Image (cartoon, grey):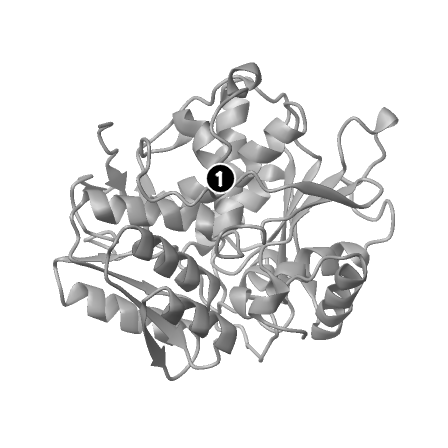
Amino acid sequence: MTPLPDCFCPADGTRVTSQSLAWCCPVCRGPLDLDFAPTPAPLKSLAGRVNSLWRYAETLPLGTPSVSLGEGRTPLVELTEGVLAKLDFLMPTLSFKDRGAVLLAELARRLAARQVLADSSGNAGTAIAAYCARASLPCTVYVPERTSPKKLEQMTAHGARVRTVEGDREAAARAACEAASADPGTFYASHVFNPYFLHGTKTYVHELWEDLGGRLPDVLVVPVGNGTLLLGAALAVAELYTAGLIDRRPALYAVQTAAVAPLAHAWEEGADDLVGETPAAPTAAEGIAVPRPPRARQILRAVRDSGGTFLTVTEHQIRQAQLDLASRGLFVETTGVTCWAALREVAPGALPHFRSRAGGATPTAVVPLCGAGLKSGLA
């Protein structure tokens, strides 16, 4: 079995052994990164491999899994000229969170954890519940009180114990952290703190690169709450560029709802981290309603380094985008439509990276449709 890479704290350099159940830096309590710099396989060598995200084995920190549900390899469809959508709601648990959840469940199994704890606004919890069921691991998920009923039902159906916490998304995270810290035999499957999750979400970009014939679009538009998809995308872009498999890096466009936009506010202020207490209001996009993302510095740096920017969308724009996608045959949950909501408001040529490409060799932008509409209903 391939040895597990160690973790380290990006803030202070503290190292954590690969055999530890520690989920955060023991010094500053911040999130961890993985000491892992893989080299992706060339495009031609991917032919004939397993039709799941595990076809990118060289880039994953875990070897052949025992808990896979065939996750990954979701299709691309055109929304408008130059803009493609990746249908990540066509995953086993109907959201992109399966990409990271499968790695966390596999890691928990290999570390012989007695139980798994997670916190979530919905989709990460349903994914972790499903993959823990697959791995025969007891699972408890802490959720905020306004979590969509269908997501709660899905977690329960997979056998997870659901703990509803009064308050917002951060209250659920605090409750899970406290419970995990109280039991040294517990694996805290945090999709925010545990870096294995990011190395699962990065397969989103590896799939784009393969399906676009060894290219990436000018712009990757990504919804951002805790930033797991954006940071995974940044990892994949760096791997492909370092290996010489792409000759330019796409810009990362991060989308937040205007109701909860701490990162967009910090961006506007030119800050490297969150600035003060940004007001938060109720939003239909519950999956990105995160007032204080723990990886804020990393998210802001990744967007800045890519030459990208932040965009925000209103509740009205979310509703209209959801209906627009449904009219095109795509019923997507409210959080999952935010990127399309942002692009629908952009006039041609208004953003610097949106340019026509002769012959249509590469789309201008790709948006993820990351959760099924049945999870949240209509906004």
For this view, does 84 lie left or right of residue 151?
right
Q: Name the foreground residue: 267 vs 348.
A: 348
Residue at x 41% of width, y 40% of height: 199
Q: Name the foreground residue: 305 vs 247.
A: 247
Q: Position of residue 80 (x, y in %)?
A: 83, 46
Figure check: 343 above or below 241: below
Figure check: 190 above or below 57: below
Element type at mark 1? loop
Q: Name the foreground residue: 209 vs 352.
A: 209
Q: Position of residue 205 (x, y in %)?
A: 56, 37
Q: Is residue 155 visible?
A: yes
Tag 1: amino acid: Lys
Q: Name the foreground residue: 158 vs 33.
A: 158
Q: Position of residue 231 (x, y in %)?
A: 49, 45
Which residue, given by chain and number where applicable, does mark 1 sit on? 202
For this view, does 330 lie left or right of residue 140?
right
Q: Residue furthest left?
A: 184
Residue at x 22% of width, y 70% of height: 178
Figure check: 243 above or below 83: above
Q: Position of residue 77 (x, y in %)?
A: 73, 43
Q: Residue furthest bottom?
A: 166
Residue at x 22% of width, y 28% of height: 1
Q: Is residue 301 visible?
A: no
Mark 1, other Cα within 10 Å: few <14 / some 14–19 / many ≥20: many
Q: Which quadrant of the figure contains the C terminus? A: bottom right
Residue 124, quarter of the rendered image = bottom left
For this view, does 72 lie left or right of residue 164?
right
Residue 354, quarter of the rendered image = top right
